[in-house]
Image (cartoon, coloured by chain):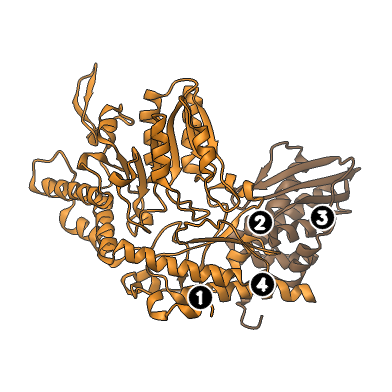
Chain colours: A orange, B brown
Amino acid sequence: MSLSQAIPLAETTLELAGDFPILARPVRGKRLVYLDNGATTQKPVAVIQAESQFYEQSNANIHRGVHWLSQHATDLYEAGRATVRSFLNARHDDEIVFTRGTTESINLVAQSWGRANLKAGDEVLITAMEHHSNIVPWQMLCEQTGAVLKVAPIDDRGELLMDQYARLLGPRTRLVCVAHVSNALGTINPVEDIVREARRVGALVLVDGAQAVAHQSVDMQALDCDFYAFSAHKLYGPTGIGVLYGRRELLQAMPPWQGGGDMILTVSLDKSTYADAPQRFEAGTPNIAGVVGMAAGIDYVQSVGLDRIAAHERQLLDLATERISALPGVRLIGTAAQKAGILSFVIDGIHPHDLGTILDSEGVAIRAGHHCAMPIMTQFGIPGTARASFALYNGLEDVTALVEAVRKAQALFGSTEAS
Amino acid sequence: MSDMQPDLRELYQEVIFDHNRRPRNYHGMERPSHVAQGHNPLCGDELTVYLRVEEGIVAEASFVGQGCAISTASASLMTEAVQGKSVEEVRALFSDFHTMLTDVQPEGRDFGKLQVLAGVREFPVRVKCATLAWHTLHNALAGVSDTAKTE
């Protein structure tokens, strides 16, 4: 009996597509089959309404107005911080810094903590499966400070080689930077083990949680990492808003990154004194509506339940993996034992870009390319992959549409081959 | 593919598949008079274009590299199309070809087999695939040493 027969239809859908207005619009005359959730997720009505209601009912600048509306907007903004703290199970609200997204969060740590703490010869250890946003800021920091960037290798399944990782840790290792979930391979990294090893040499750990937070519950106290970064837009929230979690004592000791309003206590023309964290890192008027929308997205995800979402996406991944690998000439890229809902693959004779165009004509939206993880593509000797990534609103019919569209592409490229 | 969308059939014509599977003039060149490399960082397409120009005429054109079907077929068709043409004619052809892909069909130009690439116009994100080889050729003729990019 095949896996697809083993899973009853009722369990492969959460019946939540109706919460997402965009899923009702056709694309190229076909039903939209949105499988590019690793790039960004669609937004539920709750998020869209929270943002528009903020502008209709609550809009004012925060942290400065004496008037009622400003206090109201400030309350909503700070309530968003509390929502994020609870979502991450962090200890304190002031461990939550609002940023533009994962990329800005990582750059903040590199430029604030990194420039203040790293010396020539110190080491930053990343892995070979990082997104460019968890590589380039460290390369820049190393150029600025003379620190050395080390890279822990991965195997052919896309799993971090833990023994080699442990061997690369040493007395000069100051910081370890690792993806919680690989965006190109789907690998879930054993963050607790990574942190435990890093602690033995006194290194801090930054976790890139961009691909994790929408797909499993994360707990700062259980992970015990020092920094954790994510973006709201991959968590059913708005673009342009994200989070840096930082351990309180670290954030309090870090120098400001950007200067401006909202991050100061006093300013004279000779010298300024800075606000405490997290305000110290939130210079300028922030994305207030974005915080409100992000909080609404988190509330939505929590009302569905992350354990349910994880189980649902696991089913879709297993089903899609089985059906896609049953097609001729398919090679899966990323076959780790622990994976989130990301299916990366290449097909003999069909470039990922061609595949993406043909799938698109069937209404199936996937990502084709290097997924901002060029070093991974180099390791696997490929220019890029086709990537289907799942979200809570996907169902069995989306997996079927994906497989049918790939079959059509193969027929298109194969039928002419025979002629 | 009877249920294939018309735009898609227009993009992936038999000639494209043929040149993708069996690219013409797919080899390096011993002593090229002009050579340049092209790279599309977004999709990873890479190619090198070789030319032997004698007395202002393209006597030989070849390429090596890897890319999608559109990119490979376009490079292959280009090497056929430019042979025997003067450098000036090649430049004018590139200009018209670019117009065909991004704007309108230029009047009075017979593109020959290159006409099959006109379908790319309906797929704006794929224009760079079809023009990478041409940008690279343009750089080769101009003696530009930087890698041609379509981004």
Q: CA distance from mark 3 to mark 2?
A: 16 Å
Residue at screen point 73% across, 36% down: B145
Disc 4/disc 3 C-alpha distance (Å): 28 Å
**In this orientation, which residue lies closer to the viewer: A15 or B60?**
A15
Residue at image position (70%, 46%) is B38
Q: Is residue A129 above or below residue A45?
A: above
Residue A361 appears in view = no
Q: Secondary structure at mark 3?
A: helix
Residue that numbered label 3 is attached to: B79
Using residue B52 as the reference point, say whether residue B64 is left or right of it: left
Q: What amino acid type is highlighted by mark number 2?
A: Cys
Q: Quadrant of the C terminus of chain A?
A: bottom right
**Disc 2: CA contacts within 10 A as few (<14), some (14-19) or many (>=20):** many
Residue for point 79% across, 50% down: B64
The chain to which mark 4 is attached is A
Q: Disc 4 and disc 2: Cα gap in Å?
A: 20 Å
* Type of amino acid under label 1: Leu
| Mark 3 and mark 1: Cα distance apart in space | 49 Å
Question: Closer to us: mark 1 or mark 2?
Answer: 1
Say which label, 1 or 4, has the lower sequence index: 1
| Residue marked by disc 2 | B129
- Specify few, some or many for label 4: CA neighbours under 10 Å numbering under 14, 14-19, or 20 or more: many
Q: Residue A248: horizontal and vertical position, in percent?
A: 25, 35
